[in-house]
Image: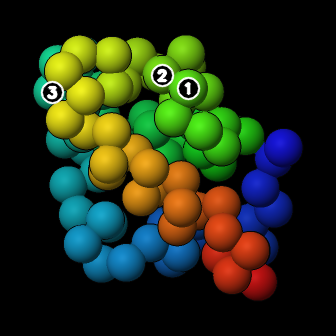
Amino acid sequence: MKTNFGTDPLDKLPPVLRRDLERNLCTCNEVVKMDIINAIINGATTVEEIKRQTFATMGIGCCTRQVERLIECLCSPEANK
């Protein structure tokens, strides 16, 4: 299911999640936050899909909650208005 973004998807994120877009969100596998955001924009709507596409959350899982939050913000019905 692709998400229909009418504006810049980053506008859907709270300020704290817009920080450090080019830094690793997943430090175990060195996955940049923007790579995770791009996966969500391109249709990934679950942590499992993010894991398959980017390898994020496959280490000790300390980034899982942040990945979930990105999915929540970018895929929520309110985010698509």
Locate residue 65 relative to residue 75 in the image: left or right.
left
The residue indicated by pointer 2 is 51
The residue indicated by pointer 1 is 48
Residue 7 shows up from this direction: no
Q: In the rendered view, would you say 17 is above or below 28?
A: below
Q: Earlier in the sequence, mark 1 or mark 3?
A: 3
> What residue lies at 65% left-to-right and 76% top-to-bottom?
79
Q: Where is residue 35 in the image (x, y as percent from the top left)?
A: 43, 35
Locate residue 55 relative to residue 29 in the image: left or right.
right
> What residue lies at 60% left-to-right and 38% top-to-bottom?
46
Q: Residues within 10 Å of mark 2 (few under 14, many from 20)?
A: some
CA gap, disc 1 and disc 3: 18 Å
Q: In the rendered view, would you say 75 is above or below 33?
A: below
> What residue lies at 44% left-to-right and 50% top-to-bottom?
68
Q: Earlier in the sequence, mark 3 or mark 2?
A: 3
Residue 27: which disc?
A: 3
Asked if marks 3 and 2 touch (Cβ < 8 Å), the reply is: no
- The kind of residue on which mark 3 rests is Thr
- Secondary structure of the residue carrying tag 2 is helix
Q: Where is residue 40 in the image (x, y as percent from the top left)?
A: 60, 44
Locate residue 16 relative to residue 75 in the image: left or right.
left
- Secondary structure of the residue carrying tag 3 is loop
